[in-house]
Amino acid sequence: MRIVQKYGGTSVGSYDRIRNVANRVKALYDEGNEVAVVVSAMSGMTNKLLGMAKEMSDNPSEREMDVLVSTGEQQSIALLTIALHELGIPAVSVTGRQAGVTTKGSNTRARIQDIDPTYMNKILSEGKVVVAAGFQGLNEEGEIQTLGRGGSDLSAIALAHAVGADLCQILTDVNGVYTSDPRVVKNAQKMDEISYDELLELASVGTKVMQSRSVEFAKKFGVPFEVRSSLNNEPGTLVIEEKPSMESVVIRGVSIERNQARVTVTGIPDEPGWSGKILKALGESEVNIDMIVSNIANDGFARHSFTMNSDDLGRAQAALKTILADLAGGQIETEAGIAKLSCVGIGMRSHSGVAATMFDALGEAGINIGMISTSEIKISVTVEEAEIEKAAQVVHDAFELGA
Ligand code: ASP
Ligand code: MG
């Protein structure tokens, strides 16, 4: 089999951890597999490098930042390759450029345009292990570019696609994808499988298992992969294209997102153009809006409520002040200290009463629901941040996810 494995920063975070990875790779190699390994920088290294640039300038050039931070991955590929040599395994390290990764777009957040796997294929066909640097590539002008934080996940998925791997494994410090955050919901279970769309929804609502762009890429190109632990040999969670049998599970997972805030604008004239105007002001101030609820109050004026990360609240207030003057006695109300709870599952499409079950469970626990929003495979509500853990547990119980 041709296997691509990706080890994140924690998994290569010390010399011992690197030796552990080398042993794991050796085991696969000894079974007769062709193995390509993608690695991140040692944990903390990318931040350290970013800090070094800040010592030189408050506003370092993004081009030079990429030259600097890409060295983190270059350290780990060489160290892992040397560790493999110590075990008698023929291995060759490759940078993003040598791996044939062409990027496009802006420095520090580039995208992968194309991968030419010729050199990697040659190494593999000579019976050697490829150790490739994640997170980096070269654009058509020949500049080193990085793929945004957490970008090694994307490198691994794209590389697996390019070399036609039979199996792609993302090895990390968790055992797989869980039905909820195990630190909060004690009986959360590791899932055997999850669809790309469900993982994307869970990721966007706070279950940070992998960089979302990498999951989008996997979905687009149909690259199945497994998320599993680099510290044990237990099977992890398979992330795959959805299949009909998956719909029998109503809710795949419950995720929580803390540190949310709500802004409500009242006194909005009930006429065309206002929603656009408000959202434009928020967008120009780089406020990331999440949920939107709007309705017409008894006085004939509309009110809009938005949620966002609390960190954006100050900017949102400033942006909306410019609009306030045009509002007929309208006001801007804010509330911090809220959190978002979401149920995600493609089974929602074919099961009714999912929202009722969720809301009932919260009601019975005496938890008040603030805002509600739904999509085809997700229902989200806001609650007081102090109640989020209890909320997650009762909803998790209501859907019997604890097994
Ligand atoms: N080293 C990079 C980062 O810390 C890429 C990665 O870890 O995936 O963001
Ligand atoms: Mg990482």
Image (tube, rainbow, N blue to C red):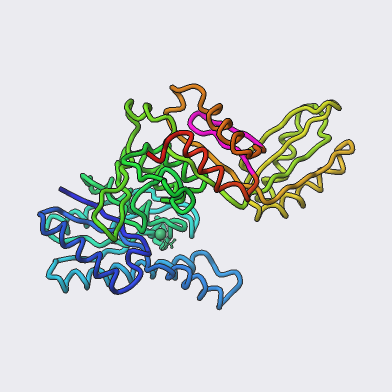
Q: Is 63 situated left or right of 33 in this image?
A: right
Say which quarter of the image contains residue 269: top right
Depth check: give the residue in front, 235 or 365. Answer: 365
Point out the stretch of residues depicted in magenta: 371-383
Query: What residue sits 65% from the left and 46% below the top?
Result: 384
Q: Residue 71: image x %, image y %?
A: 38, 70
- Magenta stretch secondary structure, dominant: strand
Q: Is 61 situated left or right of 264 in this image?
A: left
Q: Taking 395 as reference, is 150 above or below it?
A: below
Depth check: give the residue in front, 247 or 354. Answer: 354
Query: What residue sits 33% from the left and 52% below the top?
Result: 175
Q: Residue 75: image x %, image y %?
A: 33, 72
Q: Residue 81: image x %, image y %?
A: 23, 69
- Where ligand 1 lies, by image quadrant? bottom left
Q: Taking 33 as reference, is 253 above or below it?
A: above
Q: In the image, is residue 10 part of the stretch drawn in magenta?
A: no
